[in-house]
Structures are given as structure tokens and as C-alpha cells.
Amino acid sequence: MRTPPGVSVGRYQQALRQFTDAVGRDFVYTSDADVDLYRDAYSPFRGENEEIVASAAIAPDSVEQVQQVMRIANEHRIPIYPVSTGKNLGYGGSAPVLSGSVVLDLKRMNRILEVNERNASALVEPGVSYFDLYRHIRERGYRLWVDVPDPGWGGLIGNALDHGAGYTVLPMRDHFDGHCGMEVVLANGDIVRTGMGALPGATTWQQFHYGVGPYVDGLFSQANFGVVTKMGFWLYPEPEAHRCGSVYVPRHDDVHAFVDILCYLTNSGICDSTIQFDSPMITAAAKDAAVAAIVNRRGGAAPSDWDHIAAERGLMSWGTKFHFYGPQKVIDARWEYVRERFGVIPGVKFTEGSAHRFPLTREQVEQVDPADKVSLGIPNLQIFAFGARTQDNPSPTSGHLWFSPVVPMSGEGLLTARRVFHDAFAEWDVAPLGSGLPYSFHARTFLFLYGFQVTADPAVNRRNRATFRRMIQLAAEHGWGEYRTHPAFMEPVTDAYSFNNHALRRLHETLKDAIDPNGIISAGRYGIWPRHLRQRRT
Amino acid sequence: MGNRREFLLGGLAGGAAVAVAGLPVAGAGTAARVPLPPRAASAAPLYRLIVDERFSVTHGLLAAARGQGVASSAIDGDVTDVWFNDLDLRWRQGPAPIAGLTTVGALFCLERLAWDAGMRLHFRADHRCFADGRVEHVLRAPASVVTRADALRLAHPDWARALLPLLTRGTAAPAGALSERIVIGASGSFPAGHTEWLVSWYLGPKAAGRGSVA
């Protein structure tokens, strides 16, 4: 039998008996066959002794059962690791940070407690997936959208708490920013409701974020201060129409004007979808050695060389696709204004994209271009079909880890980050997955996403882990930090946020000691260790 | 199911209609039969066969399934439609076995979704093709099933298709760790130059006595 660290077998067995009394025999899992299902499918330690594994799992069905479990865990000092649907692949899945923890599997708590069409909000439990809420909305004919990430099988609460994001409009596509109100079970079994939920009988829990007094919701994201058992989300009123269009500019140094205009348009809400930066030049470099020699030059491309070969090949340098949602006349006007603003850049090209009017029938949903589904709030699993071995992808991996630093949303920020990262890749002889171009999921920033492979070969995984750690350090040296990370890297990632001798970490630890003095919840998550385990920090 | 990618072949075929005692070996006029492992008394009939129609090696299996009235769905790599519009709704009523010949990615998704419905992987045969024409098959199943599956491989040139009776018939939930056997041979029905890593699989109800979530 696997046991939690520092807990005797006898005491652990006593706790398991009490967990069984609380949630029922069928929902306490201790066999290796069952517990192995909670292993991280993308673990970078797979096949090595360092792999982080749970000792057991418990699946409560109600908030009352969660309270009982927390009281029992607190009594016996059993480390608990809550997961919602456990699909946070690339960022740890359902495996804990501390080996031997008991996974608190909340997927049976899958009730959609309310959907308010007038105020475009929902209140859900942790086991509700994007697919579940999407189905619920469609079956009832609500004229609402839920913003969905890639892929759609994750839970709304788990994704929001790990600062996940989607593709439609702000604030809904920043899933934590788009939440409104929480219910949280603390380590001692007490229940807290945040915002207006603290007011008995309040009818605006999912409408007004703050309630009164300190706004504490952030304490429960990427943290370990409580178990979130309910969460409200703002939904997007189904728009009348959608259209999209692309803008491309020809020269290397156009990136500065391009991003400046982009910033104005996104910060003012004229363009309000996720930005996925594109560069036909960089794409061409994968297959054209001459282009690659210029694009991937150490120290950055020389603009004159770049422009010369771009003109020779007929390739544009930079671009992106905009999605517009709303009344037809409004989105037509927005697109016209976008063209007007970018029209000042000589040689700019515009391309019309797909267009839709809503609601879509089921047949129309199935006919939506797979690449556009997430932009229309349609959950799917298409992303798992992209990793198949094909002529262009001869070596599919067993998984990946995302290195995801936040960088300034400016032309200079983009070019500098690309140069720094790609010079390092060349020096270290590594080739992470990804376009090497930024996204803007969250407001006012670029996010780079580099995928490091998880393979069946521990030697490759060891090398990729080492590279990942070097990337964290390299980014930090330039003032860039990760927005989210796999448990294997939570320590170095959070260690980089070190202003004033790690004052933020010290604050987190002060809070941890006060709120969860026995340190039973998600020990080590995002670098927050309970007092008795702080020596584990390396 | 109204899905443009699906071929609903005879609706929800009953187990008796699709279960056969052994597969007639079609190659070169032979008529031998390879006995199949006994189906557990509790084994439910196959609910749906899922194949990735992008790969020609799946077409024989799909045609054979169609001929036997097995409810089948063809996908193009993405399992969303078949899961969202069919399996999720069915599995809300309880476990219902499915089988397939798909990419590893499709199985990865379906297996995890099946876990949540109280199901487990009973059988898996990875088919990895190499540029020189060899194909490596890695079989994972209870020992008796591995033996039978390998016998089917030796007896039939189109092994992907030959597995149909085993996939439709199902097997009892493995009581412990799955046995593994690796065999390497000529590509057979896997065309030369075929580079996809495909997998035949069966997902059925988990063994009694285990918890019902994940």
C-alpha cells in the first residue's frame, strides 16, 4: 500500500476507513489499478523513481462530503490534492505535487446549479466540463456561449483556477477573470462564500464580483488555501453574427506599427478575440533553407535581408486573424475600422475569413472549420488529432510540457523574446514544439508557448527537464515569468518571482500557516509548502 | 445518429447478431477457424466500433463490420462528434463497450472518457509500421486474449480486419495487469510506406469491486 509521507500505515488505514464512511465504499480508491489512473499522462518523470504519484483517491458527491473529508484529513494530517475533472494535461493532469497525497476527485460533483440567461451567468460545481455546460445550454435553447479552451473536456473551475483561457471575448475568455463568486471548503471543513455569496439571500452572487471588503478570490487560484466547490461564471450572450478577417504586413520592421495598432484595437475593445500571431516568413523557414538562414540568424534577423528574401519569395512578414462578434452592422463597422487603421502601413493586405449567423443548427456546428470551433465557443477534442504521426510529424510524442512566459505586448517585446529564446535553442541544440510566435489570450500581454516533449525515453525527458529549467532562468533574467506551469517546475518558476527577498512567497506562507496550519491541501502547489514540508524546497 | 461522418450500420446491433464463434480465415482459400476466447458471462454486447477512415488499413475492418451489422462510426482523427453526440449520452446510462482501430491520440481521448463512465481498457494492439516494411505489433490483454489475437495474426493476412470478432465479442475485464507480447513481422495489410501508429482496442466495463469513478 502506498502511504502519504510522514503518516503511519495504521493511521492512514484509520483515515481511509473514515473516508469510506464519509463518501461510500465505492468511492475510495486504494488499489494500484485504480490509483494509477490518476498518474499524469504527460509526466516528464514517467519511468523514473521521481514520478509523483498519489496514494489513494476519494470521490465525494457533495459539499457536505467534501467537508467531512477535509475534517478527517485534518485530524490525521493526510495530504489532499483536489482536482476537478483531472484533465489539466501539460500542466500536471490529476497527479499531485507531493507524492503520496490523496487525490480529492471532484468529478462526481457535476451539477449545473443555475444558468441565468438574462444576466448571462452560470453557477457550477467542479466536475462540470465545458462539454457539459455547452450541452446544457444547447439542450435548453439558451442564447448563451461558454468560452472554451483547447481541449473542451476540462472543467470550468479547474481551468479557471489555473488561469486557463479560451478564444472569444474578454473578460469571459480569461477564465479566472470571467468568474464571479466562489464557494470554498477550508482545511478545517468550514465553508466560505466569496463576494455577494457572503450575504445570506443575496441574489447577485454571479453578478457582482466584490461584495464588500477584501477581494479574496485570487487566493484560491494556483494555490492551496481551500477546495473550491462552486464557482460562478459570466457567459457571453450569443451574438447575432461572427465574421473574421486577416491582416498581413510585408516588412520586418512593420512589426512595431502592427503591434502598436493591435494594442490600440484590443485595449479599446474594437478587436476582442484572442490574437494568434502569424508570420508566413517564419512558417516558410521550416521548409526553405535560405529563408531559415535569415529568420533564424543568431542575434536576430537583419531587417534588410529579411525584407529582401520576403519580397523575393512573395511572403508577408507578420499578421494575425481577427474574429468579430456582435450585431452584423457593428462587426462590419469594426472590420472596416480595423482596415482603416492598418491601412496606414504600406503594402498591408487584408483577407476575408469565414462568417456565421447564429444560432447554428447541429449540422452547421459540425460543418464549422475545426480551426474555428473554439473561436465560436464549440468545445472539441480536435487538438488530440493534430499530434498523430504523419508525413509532417514523423515522431509524435507521448505528451508535452508548456513553457509559457508572459512578455510585453509590443513589437520590441516580440522580437526580443524570439531572439533570446531562439538563440538559446540554437546554442543548446534543442527544438521545442510551437510556432515561436506569441498569443494574446489574456489582456495586454503576449504569451509565448513552447512545448517540450515528453517521450518514452527517460534520457530525453531528463534533458528536456534541464532545458526547461534553463528557460525559466533565462526568461527571468529578461523580466519574463511563466503564467502557469507543470508541478515539476512550480518551484523554479515561483522562485523567479523573488522581489524583496521573496516577499510574495513569504506572504503566501504566512497565509498558508494561518488558513491551513496542518498543511493538508495541495502541498507544494505553485511553490507554497506548509511549514513542516518547507525543507523540501531546493 | 445524423452525423455526416458516421455510418450507422444496422443501428444498435445486439450481441447475438454480431458475436461469432470464430473468424473464417479468408486468405488463399483456406477455411480454418481460429477459436476465440470465451466471452465472460457478464460481457455486454459491443455498442459501437470506431475506425479512423483516413487510413486505408481500416477500410477492410469497417466493411466487415458493416457486413455483420455492427454499429460503426468512421472518424477523421477527432473523436468529438462520436463522443459528444453518441457515447456521452449512452454512457450516462451506464457502461457500454466500444472497440476500434484508430490513432493512439483517439484512443487516448476515448480511454480517459471511458474511465469516467466506469470502463477500462481490456485489449490493446499497437501496430507500428517502419519504413522498411516491418510492422511491430504490441499486444496487451489478458494472457488468453493475447494468445488468441496472435493466432488471428498468424492465420489471416488482414489482421486488422481479422480482429473484428474479438473486438465485437469483447473480453472479460482484466483482473490484474495486462499481459504483453511483442511480435514483429511483415506489414501485411498495413501498406508499405504507411507511417501512422494505429491501435486496435476494446474498452469494456471494469471489473466488479472497483470504484465507479475514474
Image (spheres, coloured by chain):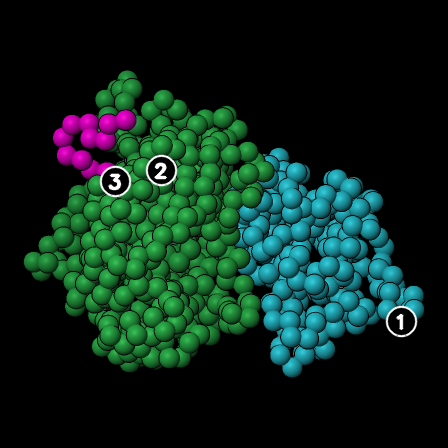
Q: Nearer the viewer, residue B204 or A159?
A: A159
**Could you tell me residue A339's position as x and y percent?**
30, 47
**Residue at the spot x=27%, y=22% of the render?**
A204
Where B149 sits versus A12, above or below? below
For the question of whether residue A200 can be seen, the reply is yes
Q: Secondary structure at mark 3?
A: loop
Dots 3 and 2: beta carbons under 8 Å? Answer: no
Colour green, chain: A
For the question of whether residue A124 can be seen, the reply is no
Q: Nearer the viewer, residue A303 or B171?
A: A303
* Colour that chain B carries in the picture: cyan
Where A343 sits versus B34, above or below? above
* Side of A152 relative to A202 (left or right): right
Which amino acid type is marked by label 1? Answer: Ala
Region in magenta: A207-226
Residue B190: quarter of image: bottom right
* Side of B112 relative to A271 (left or right): right
Which residue is labeled 3 in the image? A269
Which residue is labeled 2 in the image? A332
Q: Residue furthest left?
A: A500
Lower sequence index among marks 3 and 2: 3
Which amino acid type is marked by label 3? Answer: Gly
- The disc numbered 2 marks a residue on which chain? A
- The disc numbered 1 marks a residue on which chain? B
- The disc numbered 3 marks a residue on which chain? A
Asked if badges 3 and 1 are on one and the same chain, I answer no
Q: Which labelled disc corresponds to residue B28?
A: 1
Q: Residue furthest top?
A: A201
At label 1, counting other C-alpha atoms closer than 10 Å, the crowd grade (few under 14, some 14-19, many 20 or more) is: few
Asked if badges 3 and 2 are on one and the same chain, I answer yes
Question: Does A89 appear in magenta?
Answer: no
